[in-house]
Amino acid sequence: MEKNIFALKGDICYSKNLKELQTMEQGLLVCKEGMVEGVFQELPIEYKDIEVKDYGKKLIIPGLVDLHMHAPQYTYRGLHMDLELLEWLNSYTFPAEAKYKDEEYARVTYGRFVDRMVKSATTRACIFATVHVEGTLILMDLLEKAGMHTMVGKLNMDRNAPDYLREVSWEQSAADTRRWIEEAKKRFENNVPMLTPRFTPSCSDEIMAELKKIQVEYGLPFQSHLSENSGEIEWVKELCPYAKYYGQAYSHFGLFGGDTPTVMAHCIYSCEEEIQDMKEQEVYIAHCPESNMNVVAGIAPVRKYLQEGLKVGLGSDVAGGATENLFTAMMHAIQVSKLRWRLVDDTLAPLTVPEVFYMATKGGGELFGKVGSFEEGYEFDAVILDDSHIPDQDGLTIEERLERFIYLNQEADVKAKYIAGTQVL
Ligand code: GUN
Ligand code: FE
């Protein structure tokens, strides 16, 4: 089925807001020109002749949105979880990313990554690549051909990285960034460039100032890491004497939200001022719960961010997270919030299923526009889930089936996927 008009039939579930799930058994989800027309129990008269694809008792949910992941780290997912962030980067991440200088290696390994992404429930993602222009374009080409809709970053790293990976100067880093953007804009429609300085320790003041110029020139979104690890935070204090707190190492250069759609990954140790800046500048927080555990970073106070009205989505942070599976990320988000409540701060109540589902759909989806819901006017991103092999499902509500799917999901359970009205799986 191509983009025109059709309906999917099944047990439908989507978020209205943080607290409320909207469900309909045997509902009809109508797509017109890639957009959601609505969810109906009976097809309205004007749609009575359209094609209906009947998915029986399968669940139909909006596509999931991964606000933070590293494609080149997919090769070592599930390995090397024995170090904290800065040592982990030096020991495992930088050597793994350096291999992407080799275009053939990039084609093969990014090919495997994109295959998995297509089979997953994820429809939209913010993806870190590496410093390499050609490798990043290869990744974007594969994503485009697979029908994914993503934002992808060629990294900037012009300091504090090994010679084999560091860019030789800020001028070269900027020139490569411009060349990559020009090429990507020519070649890709649905996978777009996102400015991506790796994090403050990897980027000189000069490249940050230049990235602001590039950002204004091309009107691009922006992503980086923020306040993930105490060693990292101390280091940023030394590197950026002008910054009272980490967020100012970005806002100093005009690279902290405002008119620029911006995602900051982690935000585990953000101080009150940093939180207020993120709120005022409408910065999206990518909460990456599995990574919080694996690199022993700590647990982000997500309940506090939600209470304050900040924008929060979920990230897999592959390979800080071992899996790209966002149902697992939803489960971990609930579980780490319970441990935080029990062990760290009993004023911040654990997260709930509707809250993590919202973050993984409509919450993160907002970065991409009207994405992550089945309300009228949203882009038609839909995932069909088969939970029929799970025993003891008798009499469960759709909400209960969703909850169970979050805890018991397996890769094989995604049966079909539509992005902006086009079937990609
Ligand atoms: N901070 C800077 N780079 C990285 C990375 O690759 N992963 C994580 N989790 N944090 C980072
Ligand atoms: Fe990360």
Image (tube, rainbow, N blue to C red):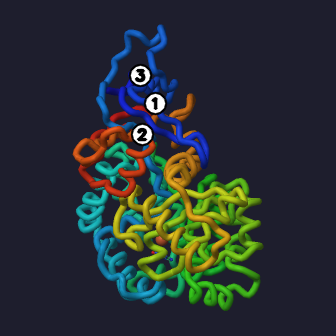
User: In percent of the image, x 47 and y 67: which residue is there?
Assistant: 335
Q: Which amino acid type is shown beneath numbered disc 3? A: Asn
Q: Secondary structure at mark 2?
A: helix
The residue under label 1 is: 24
Instruction: Give the quarter of the figure containing the N terminus.
Output: top left
Q: CA distance from mark 1 to mark 2?
A: 8 Å
Image height check: is 191 above or below 197? above
Q: Is residue 182 shown to the viewer in this render?
A: no
* Residue shown at 56% from the left, 82% from the top: 229
Q: CA distance from mark 1 to mark 3?
A: 24 Å
Spot occupied by residue 293 in the image (x, y as percentages of width and height): 45, 77
- Which comes before the other along the chain, label 1 or label 2? 1
**Dot 1 lies on which element?**
strand
Q: Residues within 10 Å of mark 2 (few under 14, many from 20)?
A: some
Spatial separation of the CA atoms under disc 2 and disc 3: 28 Å
Which residue is at the front of the view, 111 or 352? Answer: 352
Disc 1 to disc 3: CB gap under 8 Å: no
Q: Are marks 1 and 2 in contact (CB under 8 Å)?
A: yes
* Lateral position of residue 271 relative to residue 105, left or right: right
Please provide percent x and percent y for residue 338.
Answer: 52, 69
- Residue at which label 2 appears: 398
Amino acid marked by disc 1: Met
Q: In the rendered structure, which amino acid carries the disc numbered 2?
A: Ile
Q: How many marks?
A: 3
Q: Which mark is residue 4?
A: 3
Measured along the vertical axis of the image, is residue 316 above or below residue 367? below
Q: Residues within 10 Å of mark 1 (few under 14, many from 20)?
A: some
Q: Which mark is residue 336?
A: none
Compared with residue 177, is residue 218 higher up or lower down, i.e. above or below? above
State which tag comes first along the sequence, 2 or 3: 3
Residue 166 point in image, percent of width and height: 46, 82
Would you identify the image quadrant in which residue 276 lies? Answer: bottom right
